[in-house]
Image (spheres, rainbow, N blue to C red):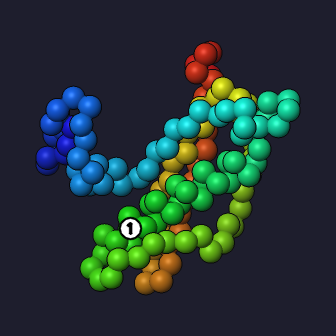
Amino acid sequence: MCKKGNMLHFIEPGILVLREIRRFCHYPHIPRIMRPDDANIVGNVHGGTILKMIEEAGCIISTRHCNSQNGDHCLAALARVERTDFLYPMFIGEVAHVSAEITYTSKHSVEVQINVLSENIVTGQ
């Protein structure tokens, strides 16, 4: 499917065009199932795994923003994490949903807010 104006059109089932996806997906949403190698021996997902997903989502949205402006192409890099709160544990088999949104931009920096939610796909919670 691709975006034309305010309508979505299917090009061919299962085939997506990268240029059209870039225009459609301004705010990345990255789902990922948590596997045993992401967790400790009791099944809790490592905080480092979640931090890595947070960094990747931030780099994606920041790089897209920087390259949507006129000028040289660039890659965004993480400079600082202001705050991270782990409210609940995440377990093997759950799906992590990582979403990113730009909250501030200036000539040389981009501030991004990342949210991570977990979903138990068996119970739907």
Residue highlighted by disc 1: 65
| Residue at x 49%, y 44% (from the top left corner) | 30
Placement of 78 over or under 72, stated as above or below: above
Q: What residue sits 68% from the left and 54% below the top?
A: 51
Residue name at image x 85 percent, y 32 percent: 41
Q: Quadrant of the N terminus?
A: top left
Q: Is residue 24 visible?
A: no
Determine the image quadrant of residue 118. top right
Q: Residues within 10 Å of mark 1 (few under 14, many from 20)?
A: some
The answer to whether 14 appears left or right of 90 in the picture is left
Relative to residue 41, is residue 108 depicted above or below? Answer: below
Residue type, mark 1 in image: His
The picture places residue 19, in percent across and down from the top left corner, at 24, 55
Mark 1: which secondary structure?
Answer: helix
The percent coordinates of residue 63 (x first, y second) are 43, 67
Q: Nearer the viewer, residue 104 or 3?
A: 3
Residue 122 locus on image (x, y percent): 61, 16
> As drawn, which residue projects farthest toward the top?
123
